[in-house]
Image (spheres, rainbow, N blue to C red):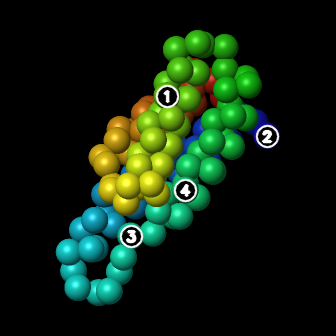
Amino acid sequence: MKSKLLDAIGISAAVLCLIHCIVFPLLLIVPMGISHNPYIDLGFLIVGTIVVFRITKQVKNTWLNVLFWGSIGIIAVSILADFIFEIHIPLIYLGAAGLITAHLINFKHHKH
């Protein structure tokens, strides 16, 4: 799969993840019977990890690889805390923003 397409998938998944993380707590305020499901976050993490793994095999910049994997690691820590301690820590926002930034930088540096 071309890196350009992987970046598009990664940006889309990271943006959807960020929207989910921002909007979902607001939905919990409205009495609709909705509860948080950390498996949705885990699904985003799995998709993001697969895309980042495939992209970083092609990326030569070490700092960009660190940004990709560091962001995945931050998201993983946040989700792990949710599963183990049943708390939602805001690190997930930082990780999603880092993934979006890394994908945009990688996308920008490709010859299209």
Residue under numbered circle 1:
70
Q: Nearer the viewer, residue 87 or 95?
A: 87
Q: Earlier in the sequence, mark 3 or mark 2?
A: 2
Q: Which mark is residue 36?
A: 3
Q: CA distance from mark 3 to mark 2?
A: 34 Å
Q: Which residue is mark 4?
A: 42
Residue 1 is tagged as: 2
Q: How many marks?
A: 4
Q: Mark 1 or 3 closer to N-term?
A: 3
Q: CA distance from mark 1 to mark 3?
A: 25 Å
Q: CA distance from mark 4 to mark 2?
A: 23 Å
Q: Are marks 1 and 3 in contact (CB under 8 Å)?
A: no
Crowd tier of the residue under label 4, counting other residues whose Cα lies within 10 Å: few below 14, some 14–19, many 20 or above: some
The 10 Å Cα crowd at callout 3, few under 14, some 14 to 19, many 20 or more, is some
Q: Residue at x 33, y 56 (%)?
A: 87
**Residue type at the position of mark 4:** Leu
